[in-house]
Amino acid sequence: MPSPRNFLVPLLLAAAAALVAGPPPAAAEDELVVRKFLLGYLEEDTGRFVATGARGTDNAFRDNVILLVFSAPVDFGSVDHRTVRIGVPSGNGLLADAGGSFIRHEVRKFNPASGAWEVRKVYRNRILFDPVNRTAPVAERNPDGFPASTLHSVTVPGLDRGARETVRGRRGQRNLRTFTTTFRTTTEYVEDRY
């Protein structure tokens, strides 16, 4: 008869392997959290994002676009100025909202047959915030972008701090962990540098 020790070793090895492997793919796919924050710009024709800064940047351009990357596809209908707060802290936890708009991240490719740039990929787990509001009619744009030489705060409320309104995933899951960061603008614009 085999000893109990012979059964225990394989069980312990299997348990250790499960811990190292992490949650099953379905559970990981259901979790919604912010994975990455970047500042940058979008290439004019392709829409490809080019990073110029990250969390805590002290030299952000006034016309930088903000990129938030989530762990799962986002329900874009849940994205607004209450579920992604971007602005200038004004004391007592209040925030003066930054003007601008949230947009989907689409990458385009030139089609020689049609002679036009066509959408080739839409990133479903990314949110862009454009302070210039480039996709709006000209009269609604904000050519100044973010205020110059100013500290800005970014908060994506999560269930961990009791938020009632959060970004939601396409499966209905809500942002689990509150994400916060800051950045400070300079007086310069991306378009003047690149």
Image (spheres, rainbow, N blue to C red):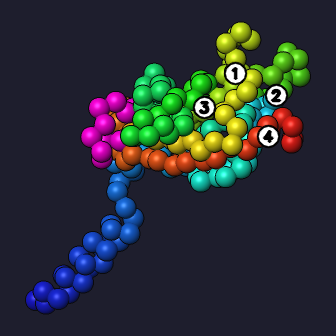
- Cα distance, mark 4 to mark 1? 15 Å
The structure residue drawn at horizontal position 51% and vertical position 30%, both measured from the top left corner, is 96
Describe the element under mark 4 as helix, strand or loop: loop
- Mark 2, residue position: 45
Pointers 2 and 3 in contact (C-beta within 8 Å) = no
Q: Amino acid at mark 3?
A: Phe
- Work out whether mark 2 precedes mark 4 in sequence or the reverse, and give the earlier one: 2
- Work out whether mark 4 precedes mark 1 in sequence or the reverse, and give the earlier one: 1
- Mark 3, residue position: 129
- Work out whether mark 2 precedes mark 3 in sequence or the reverse, and give the earlier one: 2
Magenta residues, start to end: 158-168
Where does residue 128 sit, x and y in percent of width and height?
60, 33
Describe the element under mark 3 as helix, strand or loop: strand
- Work out whether mark 1 precedes mark 2 in sequence or the reverse, and give the earlier one: 2
Quadrant in which the N terminus appears: bottom left
Q: Is residue 45 magenta?
A: no
Please state which of the two labelled residues, at mark 2 or mark 4, is closer to the viewer: 4
